[in-house]
Image: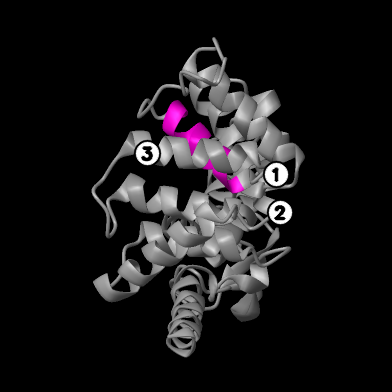
Amino acid sequence: MEGFRQGTGLKLMVLLVAFAAQACGGVIQTRVQFDTQACVESALRRGGDQPTLTMARDKFRDDCQAGDAAACSQLGVMYEKGLAVEQSIERARDLYSGACDQANTAGCVNYGMLLANGQSLARTDSGSRLPPIDHAIRLFATACRQGNARGCGQLGRVYLVRMGDAARSVPMLRQACSGGQGAACFLLGSQYDHGRLGDDPLAAMSLYEKACAAGDEKGCLHLDLIYAKISTRRSSIRVAVPARARCQPGQSCTARVAQRRVGNQPRRN
């Protein structure tokens, strides 16, 4: 029986590594550090085959009961999404909160997102009397201070989208983008693209490229759009232009860009 358990555990670990690679395998080069928990949670949010999810659920449940905070957060994702369990936002919240109480920053961010998105209120035994969005900001800020790039990105998003405070959001988004958070790169790039941080299309292009390389589909789309926009301008600036028409999500475009002089042809009268 023990040998069977060990064999099943080894099989599950191999499956989880492959599972995580679906989410992060193509973008490891863009990350400062390969975060296994974040990749597994990202893969879980995309779904999976039932046998793997069932084994993962049992593994996370056992490990969570044994005090593994990361496993509690991962099990929380399964309850949030209804993967191999009956969906329960309340159960997910409790698992995230418990993981956060054990200093698991991913759990803090997941808990904060439930609050920020209006999916849940704070736990009644938490002692917090803050409004949900303020509680979420506190959770994101805690995670960000401890080096969780996703927490920085969510904090920057709240500052920008919910509070309209670009000055506070930009440093958070930059930190998140540097940590491989494609959504943060895209959001920051869009601010340059639309002139909210000055007219700097090259900065927007660079950020969209980073977003695309990190797997953000909107970054890929807007990279194409801004190149088309820049190529119509008649200036003599040098820019990095994708060698192909489209960069695929999760695939670095940096290795296949060509330096070209854009719009430096004389005007035709």
Sequence-wise first label, 3 or 2: 3
Q: What kind of element bears circle 3?
A: helix
User: Mark 2 and 1 residues: CB-CB less than 8 Å, in contact?
Assistant: yes
Q: Nearer the viewer, mark 3 or mark 2?
A: 3
Q: Identify which amino acid the numbered label 2 is placed on.
A: Ser
- Using residue 75 as the reference point, say whether residue 140 is left or right of it: right
Colour style of the rendered protein structure:
one colour
Residue 190 lies, with reference to residue 241, above or below; the image says above
Residue 242 spot, x, y in % from top left: 55, 72
The residue that label 2 is drawn on is 178
Mark 3 to mark 2: distance in Å? 33 Å
Q: Identify which amino acid the numbered label 3 is placed on.
A: Arg
**Which image quadrant for residue 180?**
bottom right
- Using residue 95 as the reference point, say whether residue 102 is left or right of it: right
Query: In the rendering, which numbered label is found on residue 91?
Result: 3
The answer to which of 259 and 86 lies nearer the viewer is 86
